[in-house]
Structures are given as structure tokens and as C-alpha cells.
Amino acid sequence: MRYLVLFFLSLSVLAGRPTQFSHIHGYVNKECPTWDIKRFERVEKYFYFGVDNAKKYGYTYAFPIERNGVDYIWCALVPERGIKNKACNKKIFRNSQRPFEFLQNSAPDESDVSVSFVNKEEQYNEYLSYVRETLVKEKSEDPNVGAVLEILTRYYLQVLTDTYPAQDYAIESGVEYRYANQRTLGELDIIVYERATCDVVALGESKASSSKNQHNSLMKAKDQLRRIKNFLDENL
């Protein structure tokens, strides 16, 4: 009984601690400039994003791109780093104006949604442009491969599909959460919120994994979303 009382006392202490949310790059959306836990009172959906055939492994959504395609986008995005990386196809660096020229005779990648690109070169150019514009807008420098897919999930949800129409919803990535003045407990990959109220309505995790790693990556994504769910349940 004593240990049970101590357990519930510890929970009550945790619940009373102030929480903090912050964007890892310091980006501030002018419509909804501040982050606090009250914005998470209306989360209705949690989802998982993968690549290619990810839905076969249990992901909610699969972005129409192969796993190495995510690498290609990253390589063209940061050529000074990419040219030294073994994962980067060196053909990307032959022509800075057409990094994906070698893909002009390849069919576009598809997943659970159809795409209307002429070829894979056009498709990857479109993806690269969208990612680059987003990074510039949010003043995010030195992105990793995972950040590329995080941004492409927005393209899926608001351009390829009308899941969360851009006129009504905004989507951000890279918001950390913690107890005040404590270490970071986690980082949110995908945050969907209403423009009118700033209320968050959905949270997601994205994993750019190859087929052989899809299952393990999904388990990790589920753990990450379970952690934020528990954090919100304990503090709201």
C-alpha cells in the first residue's frame, strides 16, 4: 500500500510540473507563434508515414517515393555534403541544373495514391523544390534525410491529396517537448493544426526505412507517439 501511495504521489507531482514546447530551428509561424500544451487538447488522430510500400507493413500513409529516392532528394539538397556520402548516386552531381537527369527514362514512383508526373526526373524535381522552399521559409539549415520525408508528408497531405486543406490547416515539424528546464523527452515529426484556432488536431511520425526495416521502424514510431500521448494525458 505504501508503494502504491508513493506512486500516485509521484504522478501528481509530475502532473503539476510546467511543460515546454519549442521549435528546434526557432521557426515562428506568424498565425500561431507560440507553443503550449493547451494547443494539444483536441488531438483527434495519430498516424504513421513511410515510403513506397509502407502501408503493407501497417503504416497509415505511404509517400510515393522509393527509399533511395529520399536519399536522392537529400543529396541534391545539400550537394557539398552529399558528394561525400556513399548513399548518394554520383550522377546527381554531374549537372547542377538537372540533378535527376539520369532518371528521365524512369517511371514515377507510386504508392497508394496516383501521380501525374511524366517521369521520375520531373517527380523528384517537384519534391526537391517543395522541400527546399519549406526549409528556406522555416530557416532550417543542415537538414538530415529524415527531415526530407517529414516535409514531404506535408506535400502528401496538402498537395497530392486534400487530407488537410492548406487554406484551413498548417503542418509543421521539429517541435520538441519537455518538462520545464529538463531534458527533451521527444520531438514531433508531423503536427497538423487548424489555422483559425491554432489547435492541434493530428500528430504523426515519419520513417524513411527500407523494406527490411519497415517493421522495426514502425514499432519505434509507435513508441514515440505513445510517449507523447502519455505526456499529454498526464499534463492536460
Image (cartoon, rainbow, N blue to C red):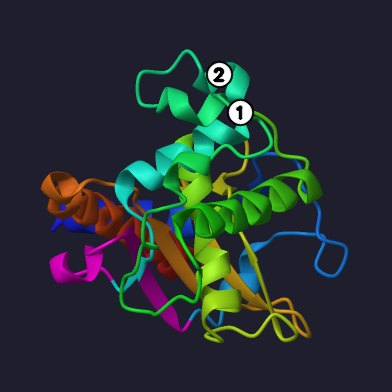
Is 213 on the left or on the right of 91, as rendered? left
Q: Position of residue 68 (x, y in %)?
A: 33, 42
Rendering quarter of residue 172: bottom right
Q: Position of residue 23 (x, y in %)?
A: 67, 46
Find disc 2 in the rendering and name its residue: 81
Find disc 1 in the rendering and name its residue: 78
Above-or-below relation of 178 to 7: above
Residue drawn at (48%, 59%) of the image: 15
Q: Start and end of the magenta stretch?
A: 44-59
Magenta-span inclusion, residue 48: yes
Out of 108 and 149, give the one closest to the viewer: 108
Are discs 2 and 1 less than 8 Å apart at CB? Answer: yes
Amino acid type indicated by mark 1: Val
Question: Which quadrant: the N terminus?
Answer: bottom left
Out of 62 and 169, give the one closest to the viewer: 62
Residue drawn at (61%, 28%) of the image: 78
